[in-house]
Amino acid sequence: MKVLKWVGITFGIYIALVVTFEALIGYFQPSNAATLSLTVYEEGGSPHTRVLSRIEHSDNLYVAVNHWPRSWFYSLQENPEVRVAFGEKDFAATAVVVDDAAEHARIDADRPLVPWFRFLTGFPPRYFVRLEAAGV
């Protein structure tokens, strides 16, 4: 019984750590030269902007879904027309969820997540979204 108590306490502390880390990332949305701003449009047309890590792979632009909070991801699945901004670039794009296993594996191999990051985020499933510039 004592072991189960300690396992429960340890698991509770871990969950609190994950929730705190995810909340801080969501609140502060740290940006740098390797990030982009992605604006998705929720039902009703209201914009919602997130700062995400930019992945450039095989002449394509991607973002990864690496966290449990992912309302922006669900919104772009409903309305894939998004706005992308980084550096001097600002353009309309269509967001395409990568569902091809080979493409997913190539991107994941090129940009693997370090174990400590996976631990701090609670081991969420990872998805990729290709951002195709409108009119291209």
Image (cartoon, grey):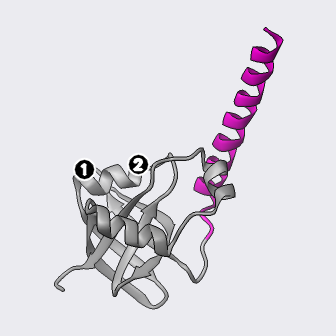
- The answer to if 16 sits in the magenta stretch is yes
Q: Position of residue 112 (x, y in %)?
A: 54, 67
Q: Is residue 4 left or right of residue 78?
A: right
Question: Quadrant location of the N terminus?
Answer: top right
Q: Residue furthest left?
A: 135
| Residue 45 seen in render | no
Q: Main secondary structure of the magenta part?
A: helix
Q: Is residue 37 above or below residue 127?
A: below
Q: Secondary structure at mark 2?
A: helix
Q: Secondary structure at mark 1?
A: loop
- Return the disc, 1 or 2, that comes first in the chain's sequence: 1
| Residue 90 seen in render | yes
Amino acid type at image mark 2: Ser
Q: Residue furthest right?
A: 2
Q: Position of residue 43 (x, y in %)?
A: 26, 49
User: What stretch of residues is rendered in magenta?
Assistant: 1-30
Q: Which mark is residue 44?
A: 1
Q: Nearer the viewer, residue 41 or 123?
A: 123
Cα gap from disc 1 to disc 2, whole angstroms: 15 Å
Amino acid type at image mark 1: Gly
Q: Is residue 113 left or right of residue 101?
A: right
Q: Nearer the viewer, residue 26 or 111?
A: 111
**Residue that label 2 marks:** 71
